[in-house]
Image: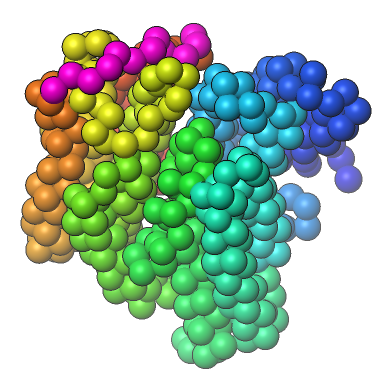
């Protein structure tokens, strides 16, 4: 095999080699190497971003047809690497102050990111399953990383048990598809599915895969693990969960719908519609009753998944582009909001209750202002970036003649605005409590600056975001 044939997966190969070397380094040097390994992991992410961003965007399939790349895959991989890098930056001060700073943490984040990249690069069901399991196994450990905390251990166990069920559904679906088609390669599956009468086993297997993917993106009614895992996991891990795995899961779902199973797109659209409406509805109403801000963000993320799926209901290149734009904007909003949560400290203790935000505008006016920007953006208030994300998914479904879905989405956005406005009200109008400590470290402050700048400037110049999402969607649909 020529080395040039591996260029499409050069970033994955680089991360795999870096991860193994860093794992050996941590095992031999012990906890004293944590800082150096964290920095090395961050540098590895930056190098991988450079490698992915400079690869030719033409479609290529390598490794016997199991892995491939195009403009769509490269777009998702860069976003995944940026999300992982941001999550790593958010975690440093928290882990040190919580006495959780160990060399295996950045290595686990690296391997989880590698699994997500392999998922979206997969061109066969085997490649898909291997990447998804690599991601899942590392996330189970990260969820229970705080071993001396009962909630963290509980969240890791719940995620493992329910995740194993979803993996079983996926594997059973793959076995049915292979039994009905005789192949696991996406290209050959596309030919079988687009035949006049695809085998019943293949259709049933696809239903199982849809159920497994709905679990991975925490779409209703497969969301039951999300609030408990988000609350129990360490806050930087929750930020990682809310960003990268959701992006990878939705990206993979899009690739399956417009790749090997494109012939079943019309039949799967009602399923996506139900998932979307149920997720938007639950996310809007269930978050209202929450007192823990991490649980509130969990239900908020479920609602955002529903809005992202609206674009897939519309279908076509415009619908896929709208979903990709939504994900592009969702990531900085979510990571920035968790950056604020990680900045809420009093007497060295990280605060997680919504009521703890009382008086933040008096003691830390900059943090309160940034949080206000994130909350307004999540509501979809113009001219912030969150408005454009919802505008384009609603525009896509209106053009696809699902006007009632756009109206329902707007109504549920109004309902969801309640708990975002409640946070703003608590910060600015509730009785001031004790003061907060300074923002923990330059990394969190820098991330907050970058994310809020993105949210504010996208309204002024949105053309570049529309351009790159258009190219990614065109590469997939074409």
Rendered location of residue 21, percent (x, y): 85, 30
Q: Examine the structure image and report whether residue 193 is included in the region drawn in magenta.
A: no
> Looking at the rendering, which quadrant does residue 173 occupy?
bottom right
Main structural element of the magenta stretch: helix, strand or loop?
Answer: loop
> Looking at the rendering, which quadrant does residue 101 occupy?
top right
Rendered location of residue 120, percent (x, y): 57, 50
Q: Nearer the viewer, residue 46 or 341?
A: 341
Q: Nearer the viewer, residue 360 or 130?
A: 360
- The structure residue drawn at horizontal position 48% and vertical position 52%, both measured from the top left corner, is 229
Image height check: is 34 above or below 188?
A: above
Image height check: is 293 above or below 406?
A: above
Q: Is residue 470 left or right of residue 460?
A: right
- The structure residue drawn at horizontal position 82% and vertical position 34%, both measured from the top left corner, is 23
Q: Nearer the viewer, residue 135 or 122?
A: 135
Q: Which residues are magenta?
A: 431-442
- The structure residue drawn at horizontal position 48% and vertical position 89%, both measured from the top left corner, is 197
Q: Is residue 169 left or right of residue 447?
A: right
């Amino acid at each position: 095999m020529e080395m040039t044939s591996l260029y499409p997966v050069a970033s994955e190969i680089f991360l795999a080699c870096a991860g193994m070397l860093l794992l050996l380094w941590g095992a031999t040097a012990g906890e004293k190497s944590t800082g150096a390994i964290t920095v090395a992991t961050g540098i590895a992410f930056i190098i991988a971003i450079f490698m992915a961003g400079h690869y030719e965007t033409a479609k290529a399939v390598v490794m016997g047809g199991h892995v491939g790349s195009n403009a769509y895959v490269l777009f998702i991989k860069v976003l995944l690497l940026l999300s992982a890098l941001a999550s790593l930056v958010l975690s440093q001060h928290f882990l040190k102050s919580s006495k959780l700073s160990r060399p295996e943490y950045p290595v686990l984040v690296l391997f989880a990111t590698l699994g997500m990249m392999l998922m979206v690069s997969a061109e066969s069901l085997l490649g898909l399953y291997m990447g998804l399991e690599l991601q899942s196994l590392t996330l189970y450990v990260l969820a229970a990383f705080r071993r001396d905390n009962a909630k963290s251990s509980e969240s890791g166990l719940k995620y493992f048990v329910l995740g194993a069920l979803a993996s079983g559904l996926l594997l059973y679906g793959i076995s049915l598809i292979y039994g009905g088609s005789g192949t696991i390669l996406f290209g050959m599956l596309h030919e079988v599915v687009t035949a006049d009468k695809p085998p019943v086993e293949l259709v049933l297997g696809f239903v199982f895969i849809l159920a497994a993917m709905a679990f991975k993106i925490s779409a209703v009614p497969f969301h039951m693990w999300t609030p408990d895992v988000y609350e129990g996991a360490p806050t930087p891990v929750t930020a990682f969960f809310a960003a990268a795995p959701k992006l990878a899961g939705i990206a993979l779902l899009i690739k399956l719908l417009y790749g090997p199973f494109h012939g079943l797109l019309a039949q799967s659209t009602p399923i996506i519609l139900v998932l979307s409406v149920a997720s938007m509805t639950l996310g809007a109403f269930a978050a209202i009753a929450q007192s823990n801000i991490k649980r509130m963000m969990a239900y908020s993320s479920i609602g955002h998944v529903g809005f992202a799926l609206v674009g897939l209901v519309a279908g076509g290149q415009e619908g896929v582009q709208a979903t990709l734009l939504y994900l592009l904007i969702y990531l900085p909003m979510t990571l920035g909001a968790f950056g604020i949560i990680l900045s809420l400290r009093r007497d060295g203790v990280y605060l997680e209750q919504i009521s703890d935000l009382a008086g933040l505008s008096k003691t830390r006016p900059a943090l309160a202002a940034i949080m206000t920007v994130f909350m307004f953006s999540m509501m979809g208030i113009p001219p912030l970036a969150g408005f454009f994300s919802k505008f384009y998914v609603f525009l896509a479904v209106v053009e696809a003649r699902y006007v009632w879905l756009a109206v329902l989405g707007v109504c549920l956005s109004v309902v969801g605005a309640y708990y975002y406005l409640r946070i703003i009200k608590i910060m600015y109008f509730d009785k001031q409590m004790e003061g907060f400590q300074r923002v923990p470290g330059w990394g969190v402050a820098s991330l907050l600056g970058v994310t809020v700048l993105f949210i504010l400037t996208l309204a002024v110049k949105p053309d570049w975001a529309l351009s790159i999402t258009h190219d990614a969607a065109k590469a997939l649909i074409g």
